[in-house]
Image: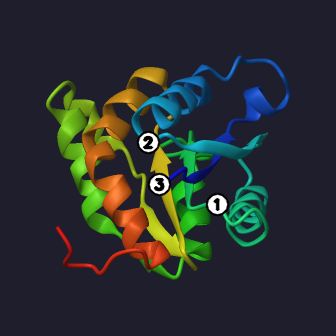
Amino acid sequence: MRWKVALLTASDKGSRGEREDTSAQVIRELVEEELSGEIVDYRIVPDEQDEIMAALIEMTDYFQADLVITTGGTGLAPRDLTPEATLKVIDREVPGLAEAMRIGAMQRTRRAMLSRGVCGIRGRSLIINLPGSPKGVHENLMAIMDQIPHALNILSGRIGEHAE
């Protein structure tokens, strides 16, 4: 099964072309290697809640991505609004994934507890917020990678929730 995956980077500097988006490259590599996923959409938007929300809605509703992974905007800075934008567009949260990411990353750095990333469901799409740094992206995504296929199978209706 090739999962349809969309990548969204929230970054003021990235959206202006002032910073290379190395975090999205890490996500792309992990998605292709670990999930055999196909990237169906990729974009960089500024740290504006409305733009993040619009991109998430388009990625889930129009592109019908099975999985949308965001990077950036999950910290404590005033313009870090990705979790708020995500919460406004999802139907339900999946808090266990966000908790597992923070726990996994905290084994390497205590600062991981400051990440505010959330995970949730919109329709049949799973949305996962990751930090903005390539290292944080790798640590967080690998902490939950083994559960993503099962979650996507449940969301797509391919298997029941309690299947092994």
- Say if 102 sits above or below 62 in the image: above
Closer to the camera: disc 2 or disc 3?
2
The crowd level at tag 3 (other Cα within 10 Å; few <14, some 14-19, many 20+) is many
Q: Residue at x 27, y 79 (%)?
A: 161
Label drawn at residue 128: 3
Chain-order first, disc 1 or disc 2: 2
Pick out the residue farthest to the right. Answer: 16
Q: Which of marks 2 and 3 is nearer the N terminus?
A: 2
Above or below residue 155? Residue 145 is above
4 lies above or below 20: below
Q: Which mark is residue 35?
A: 2
Marks 1 and 2, how far apart at CA: 14 Å
- Looking at the picture, how far across and down is residue 38, in whole percent? 62, 43
Q: Which residue is drawn at 43% across and 64% down?
A: 152
In front: 64, or 92?
Answer: 64
Residue in the picture at 27% in, 32% down: 111
What SS does tag 1 mark? loop
Horizontal and vertical percent position of residue 92: 44, 80
Q: In this view, does 62 lie to the left or right of 83?
A: right
- Residue 66 position in % (x across, y down): 56, 62
Q: What residue type is labelled 3?
A: Ile
Residue holding disc 1: 65
